[in-house]
């Protein structure tokens, strides 16, 4: 199921000299950008409520929100470095927010503020987990260059008779 077609590569038809845009499969830049922006907005919105229980200083949280916005905006199908940077940022975001979620859960399971903090961090961790997956699919697309793979029969037949 392919849902994200946000980059269109020009393709010339033989009979017509006009450029026609064809969707490029496996580029998920808009989805990653959206996840980064939603996560950054979530951090900014919830920071005033959780700043006293968070083990991460507020300035670091604000810087993280800015980094998510900056690198989300830099996402481009033509820049492999931006794709790799977004994958690394998604990985770091997942690790940081999952750690914060587990820490909040272990600190207090009865305090409603810690429960809310746990929930927000768990949602952010899941968002970054999704962004990491989509980033890796995008990198794979960029590295492989949309090469066609051989038929499955050829792959399985190659191993027989050796």
Image: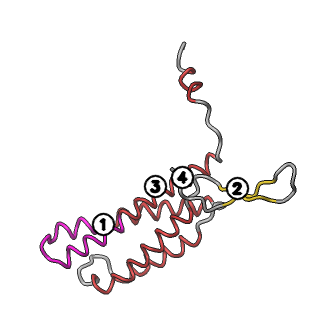
- The label on residue 45 is none
Return the residue found at the far left. Answer: 110
Instruction: Mark 4: give few (<14), some (14-19) or many (20+) Cα within 10 Å.
Output: few
CA distance for labels 3 and 1? 17 Å
Q: Nearer the viewer, mark 4 or mark 1?
A: 4
SS at circle 2: strand
The residue to which callout 2 is attached is: 22
118 in relation to 11, above or below? below
Q: Which residues are magenta?
A: 98-125
Extreme residue toward the bottom, this view: 48
Sequence-wise first label, 2 or 1: 2
Distance CA(mark 4)–CA(mark 1): 26 Å
In front here: 128 or 3?
3
Q: Residue at x 64, y 39 (%)?
A: 148
Q: Which residue is mark 4?
A: 2
Distance (Cα) linking label 3 and label 2: 24 Å
Point out the image quarter for the C terminus. top right
What residue is shown with label 1?
122
Which residue is depicted at the point 60% across and 30% down? 151
Question: Which of 101/55 is in front?
Answer: 101
């Amino acid at each position: 199921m392919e849902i994200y077609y946000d980059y269109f590569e020009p393709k010339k038809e033989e009979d017509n000299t006009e450029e026609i845009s064809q969707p490029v499969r496996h580029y998920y830049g808009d989805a990653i950008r959206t996840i980064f922006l939603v996560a950054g907005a979530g951090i900014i919105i919830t920071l005033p409520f959780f700043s006293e229980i968070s083990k991460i200083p507020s300035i670091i949280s604000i810087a993280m929100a800015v980094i998510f916005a900056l690198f989300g905006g830099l996402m481009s199908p033509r820049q492999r470095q931006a794709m790799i940077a977004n994958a690394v940022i998604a990985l770091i975001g997942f690790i940081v927010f999952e750690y914060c979620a587990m820490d909040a859960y272990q600190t207090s399971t009865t305090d409603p503020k810690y429960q809310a903090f746990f929930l927000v961090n768990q949602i952010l961790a899941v968002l970054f987990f999704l962004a990491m997956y989509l980033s890796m699919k995008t990198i794979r697309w960029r590295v492989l260059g949309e090469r066609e793979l051989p038929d499955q029969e050829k792959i399985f037949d190659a191993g027989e008779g050796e």
